Amino acid sequence: MKRMPMETLQLCADLISELDQQLTRTKAIAQLPAERLLHRTDPDKWNALDVFEHLNLSSGIYLRGLERAFAEQAPSLRATPTFTPGFIGDYSTRNMLPRADGRLVWRMRTMRMFDPARQHGSDHESINRFIALCEGFIKLLQLAPGTDLNRMRVTSSLGPVIRFRAGDAFRFPIAHQKRHFLQIERLLAHR
Amino acid sequence: MDLLRRTIVRYVELSDRDWAVIAPRWKEYAFSRGAFISSVGKVEDRFYIVAQGVQKLSFPHDGADICVGFAYGGSWSGEYASFLTRKPARFDVVAVTDSILLGIAHADLQRLYAEMPVMERWGRLIAEEVLVGRATREIEQMSLSAGERYERLVKRSPQLLQLVPQKDIASYLRMTPETLSRLRRSTS
């Protein structure tokens, strides 16, 4: 698929709007009774808190990488009006999002370092940390039009070998979060 | 929250007016299994009552995790000593199963103690209960045989054997996992 340049301003606005929706929903979820947050469809499957913690672990890599990049690389870069996704960044982001019919492609196994059940578990704080995480992304997205999201690079969660363009380092984790909100809603619909 | 009121009135009498002051200070907290409720080195800010689930109290020693107790249905949870002293916790408290705890922050509880004699009395009674519990366990640890310690646990909290990993039960009973499994086989 041909990778088209996108307007940086529009991209940032779209991502901020997606994050705002996720934040609004998350703040409502934080008020739900503990019992619903802990609900599992199967004893070995994740509950909603585990999903939030999984997002903290995985998106956290990008947020920290972006924060470092904005501090170290951004000052020496000139603002560019467009962003062209990188090959792997674009491919990963597209496959992360549900198709128009709601179908998910790319079912995958969670890596140990992103699995809360095999790290330090999850609790109410996981939700608060997720809120802080989204706010962190928004803060950087507001600065993003003033820099070059193409030339600024961030190490991906796939390992140090794969470095995303900064624009993809926003797009990919936010799409990943969106995908997991489907799972969170499914879990919370159960009662 | 109903559990909270029932738990408090086991010790002291509460009027509806008392309850209206007390209830808003408490909050429900969810912990998935494996989550740390308190951890070594961090000051415990909350006192908890267990609404659901089992938590284990342990400390790391020589590469092993030494289990010193469990909290479950209706009992207290969290790192009480750290909560009282405001010093770093010496124990980890970890959710063994998905847990719901009713918690109150240190400052809120102190305020309740200061404003309501009935709550201060409650606080004294639970502190006494904890102290007596510790003394009892100390004597059991020193004087009972492995088999007797196991039987005590079976009688007092049989559900723990189903919910808690064997290695934690063995550590709690100060015996090897092998001894524990031999005891389980011989008594079943």
Image (spheres, rainbow, N blue to C red):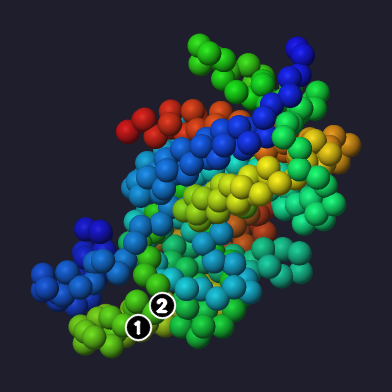
Task: Check the image and name the residue furthest to the right.
Answer: A161
Look at the numbered disc 2 and give the secondary structure of its residue: helix
Residue B38 placement (x, y as % from top left): 54, 66
Q: Is residue A131 above or below residue B75?
A: above
Q: Nearer the viewer, residue B21 or B156?
A: B21
Q: Would residue B104 appear left or right of A163 to someone viewing this image?
A: left
Residue beneath disc 1:
B110
Q: Would residue A20 appear left or right of B25 to someone viewing this image?
A: right
The C terminus of chain A lies in quadrant: top left
Residue at the image position 42 percent from the left and 43 percent from the top: A24
Q: Is residue B84 visible?
A: yes
Q: Amino acid at mark 2?
A: His
Could you tell me which chain the residue with mark 2 belongs to? B
Q: Are marks 2 and 1 in contact (CB under 8 Å)?
A: yes
Name the mark on residue B8.
none
Residue at the image position 73 percent from the left and 31 percent from the top: A82
Residue beneath disc 2:
B106
